[in-house]
Amino acid sequence: MKSISKNLNHFAGRKVSRRKFMQASSALGLAGAAPGLFLGNAAHAATPARGGHLRVATVQGSSTDALDPIRLTSGHTNFMFSTFHNALTEIAPNGQLVPLLAESYETGADPSEWIFKLRQDVTFHNGKTVTSDDVVTSLSRHRGEESASSMKSFMEEVESITADGDRVVKFKLKSPSVDFPVILSASVLSILPTKDGEIAAFDAGAGAYMLDAFEPGQYSRYVRNPNDFRSDRGFADTAEILTIADSTARQNALVTDAVDVIGDVDATTADLLARNGDIGILDITSTQHYTFPMRTDLAPFDNNDVRMALKLSINREDVLDTILSGYGSLGNDHPISPANRYYNHELEQRVYDPEKAKWHLKQAGMSNLKVELSASDSLYAGCVDTVVLFSEHAKASGIELVPKQVPDDGYWSDVWLKHPWCASYWSGRPTEDWMFTQGYSAESNWNESYWRNEQFNQLLVAARAELDDDKRRQMYWEMQAITRDDCGSVIHAFANHISAHSKKVGVPEQVAGNWEFDGYKMIERWWLAG
């Protein structure tokens, strides 16, 4: 057997200031680590301090949020599951995939077989020891026709999950997947305590913090786990995550010391906020991108000429400069960023072209078009303003784009995947396979544009199993081109993760960028320095 747990390099927490300073990542894993930029007075301490109460405010949260990871609906729940649960693996701040509840993992004869060995004597918050039966039961819930899991499309590729004693779990895949251990780092695939083949508790995890209270759409609170198996995690005594959807209110909460850290800082005010001597700004390059997915199963979006007309009718440079103040990079109507390993840097950048958009409308048998685009600022700061700006751009193409601002609460349950055209965003995924499978494969229940492309789906399966790196790269390059020219999403910008924190907060030297909030591990990795 060939052990590869130390050889899979994945998304790194690269940090740069603005798009003009962005450089292509190195070919180590998905990306290489790069120097970080901290504006203002970012507090760095050589030795983390213990104690205190850490308060973090996020933009995302909904009254439909729930404790079951299978029902992940918002950034708040993703953050929550990453705080009090643990998965088999995790992506470290340096971008390296490392075992977490697993002690090690290895392949059999080929990457269609994976063997995971669990750590000894790790306990859940309810006192139960973590065993292979917990892993089998927890992960099996994400398979099957009735499963509503966002990771169903991945777990359906698992032919069998079996326990070999208390500490060994064996996975047999339907086809080889070299990225399979990365998939198992998802918070949705957290391991839960079980009894007699059923989940025994959703509020008991195996993380560095124990869940103390949870009010969907408002807050979740935590206390340090005194029995955590790691000594380098969990520095604050207690912590809480607050949902504050309004950007100004979130910023005021930080300035008035009502919270210690805020995420999704409005790019238009980031530089101004950095002038406050008590606040530091972190600008982290990431795979996060903003999208406008159209339901390709509904007219007029079932016509690719209509989709192309809309993609050509947004001035991406204007959005990047006006809404993001340069804190990001141009989107090219596919979800793979320059931070990804197999980014197609030779693919021509789509530009604003109203005349060509008119040509596509004519091909669709139209001289003009009226469409409605739903949006809410609960997704990210400036979302509604982006739609308004897009509507101004589209006028030159003969398109009447009607902005529809919808309620913040319930966006992911009532608007996303339901309205014909709406705003969305993705934090991105550590690998091309994860991003394409979850967001664009025909079988995914998170395929937000209901897009089906036979050539794309055939390449997706082939690339997942391909061991030759050059061949795999060519497949992912072709998939980016297909997505760009056929899919139902206008992907106009990649946005940096911009967060702000009080100077009393201690920040690690490396901050992960695979998700916001230090890969959603902020509460267990950061500390109160003074």
Image: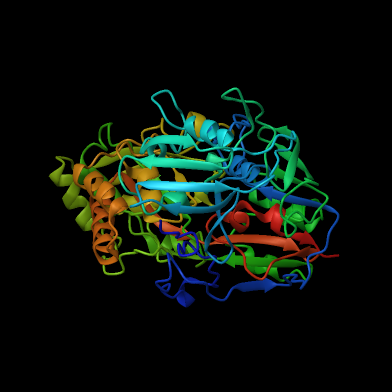
Residue 407 in view, yes or no: no
- Is 33 in front, or is 215? 33
Q: Position of residue 457 (x, y in %)?
A: 25, 44
Q: How is the image coloured?
A: rainbow
Residue at left offset 71%, top offset 32%: 215
Q: Quadrant of the C terminus?
A: bottom right
Classify 141 as above or below 8: above
Q: Position of residue 472 (x, y in %)?
A: 27, 60
Count of numbered circles in the view? 0
Q: Quadrant of residue 174?
A: top left
- Compared across the picture, whether 280 is left or right of 464 comes to right
Q: Position of residue 355 (x, y in %)?
A: 21, 57
Q: Quadrant of residue 122?
A: top right
- Compared across the picture, whether 473 is left or right of 123 comes to left
Classify 112 as above or below 344: above
- Is 515 in front, or is 364? 515
Q: Position of residue 154 (x, y in %)?
A: 40, 40
Classify 72 as above or below 308: above
Residue 449 in view, yes or no: yes
- Compared across the picture, whether 244 is left or right of 150 comes to right
Residue at left offset 41%, top offset 59%: 2
Q: Quadrant of residue 448?
A: top left
- Is 446 in front, or is 461? 461
- Compared across the picture, whether 328 is left or right of 331 comes to right
Q: Quadrant of the N terminus?
A: bottom left
